[in-house]
Amino acid sequence: MAICEGKTFRYSNASIVSYGSVAGKVESDGPFGDEFDEIIEDNKGSADTWEQAEALFQQKALKRAMEKANLVPEKMDLIFAGDLLNQCTGSSYGLKDFYVPFLGIYGACSTFAEGLLLAGAMVNAGYVENAAAVSSSHFSSAERQFRFPLNYGGVRTPTAQWTATAAGAAIVSASQNPPFIKAATVGKIQDMGISDLNNMGAAMAGAAYDTISRHLKHMGSHPEDYDAIITGDLGEVGSNMLYELFRRDGVALEERHKDCGLLIYDREKQDVHAGGSGCGCSASMMCGHFLKNVENGGLKRILYVATGALMSPTMVQQGGNIPGIAHAVEITHK
Amino acid sequence: MNISNQEYGELAKRVSPPSSMAKTIPMAFLIGGAICTLGEALLNMYAALGFSQDDAGALTSMSLIFLSALLTGLKLYDRIAQHAGAGTLVPITGFANSIVSPALEFKSEGFVLGLGAKMFVIAGPVLVYGISASIVYGIIYYIQTLL
Amino acid sequence: MDIFLDYLWAFLVGGALCAIGQVLIDLTKLTPARILTSYVVAGVILGALGWYEPIVDFAGGGATVPLTGFGNLLAKGVRRAVDENGLLGAFMGGFTSAAVGVSAAIFFGLLAALVFKSGSKINETS
């Protein structure tokens, strides 16, 4: 059977001109705590509830990014944003006061890459001048929606991941300054037969493998050509599975691979089990750390592959599996 | 994909770290045992105060449930549970925690549809199947008494 | 010395019942709600068979505090109610014997929710 190969989009005129990140307490205690633009120590700020707090995180992240680029809302043409809450309300409530044309997107934890590649495409096509990609996740709102009440003493299994309380926003425009969006590959929905709600990394590793393989093939590149291949939140289990899948093709991905879920926390000292997860995990790591390094030339060429577990507790309770997806965005200094 | 779903599932199982049972089971034993010993002490105390065995048992349950509600409210119960695992789940205090924590959590959605409606979101099945099992037993027992 | 033995048995039996729960969590991936439900139903069955009461006599709080003890209490209540009220008792005994525990959990839960707010899970840095 012929398999759809998809396309890798090439961009010639899309640059990430600004980016902002906001993180919570546990993230600020992690190894990249100093790199986020803003820390909200009590994870709530001025909000009354966790859902409102998540909206606030998105709002602050976009505000930071706009300030850095001296952009006012009237200059913004389009926002792509998403989060994990039902009906993506973290985005719609958080960004409504900007009064900027808005497209809500959902790709679970792959949302930030989805937003980035769409914003790049709209800018590159010349439809808009300034487009933003925003996404967030919040530990407490995610626990409430997907798992248990916060003060319930349920036990977390060792493969479970810790939803990051963080948000990231990036603004894409046509500019001569790095970091540039060079190419992007849209992921396919991969159902690998995983149904364990506490093992998202395993559900997503197959999708990451498929997208990375197709991207490298279309670009005619190899893992060695990149300074880093950065996955979103595969965590410990998913990363090890990804290495195993590439090993079968004779490729040693581990030499170039980094995973935001494994980086964002100090797993020796912080009780986060298999690592971080959530849309905000890779969004904040990109906007807090990696884009900065591409901009100043510390990293010349990176492949950002955000991974998402397209799960709903309802479907899983009805006996369904957890399909995964991954979108790749190639970002360069030159 | 270069792998079948079956092989993929086996790979997932292989790379997933197992629970460190050498640590979790002794912790569950110690903390669970400690809660039960506290229960025994309360039982003895109420008995010494002159309550009947049944009343002392009921008062002990009440006291433990109160303590669990308090610790849940102070956000300490889930912290202990991080280390205790089933040690804080299986005792009656775990049952109380499963009722108190959603009450606290969903208060933000209002007192009726939040707090009130969601209170039994975890403990509901315990009552449904516990009470139903007792009714089935009651019917069987009744038939036995007829024979 | 006797009192010390009472406490020791309560500790050992209660601890063992919790350790079994932990083994189930670690090996079978049963969710906490399923474990609680299984324990109560197991308690009803053991109580119905008359196997749980000897453990209660022996271990006291070690047998009554875990949720199997709650199940045993349900079975005991039903038996008593059927003896007194016949078939109707089957529908009375369970709730009667569960009354104190469930009422206490509801009322203290309500009080706690009125007094306290749900809090961020604290991630301890060890």
Image (cartoon, rainbow, N blue to C red):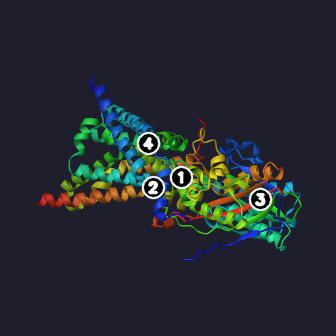
Residue A331: image tag: 3
**Where's the N terminus of chain C, which quadrant?**
top left
Residue furthest to the bottom: A1
Mark 1: secondary structure: loop
From the image, tell me which residue sits under label 1: A149
Can you say whether A171 is above or below B92 in the image? below
Relative placement, left or right, of A188 versus B5 is: right
Contact between marks 2 and 3 (CB within 8 A): the answer is no
Q: Nearer the viewer, mark 1 or mark 3?
A: 3
Mark 4 nearby-residue class (10 Å; few <14, some 14–19, many ≥20): many
Relative placement, left or right, of C27 versus A148 is: left
From the image, tell me which residue sits under label 2: B122
Q: Amino acid at mark 2?
A: Ile
What residue sits 69% from the left and 72% below the top?
A7
- Picture coordinates of residue A257 (x, y %)? 66, 51
Instruction: Let me know if marks 3 and 4 both belong to one chain.
Output: no
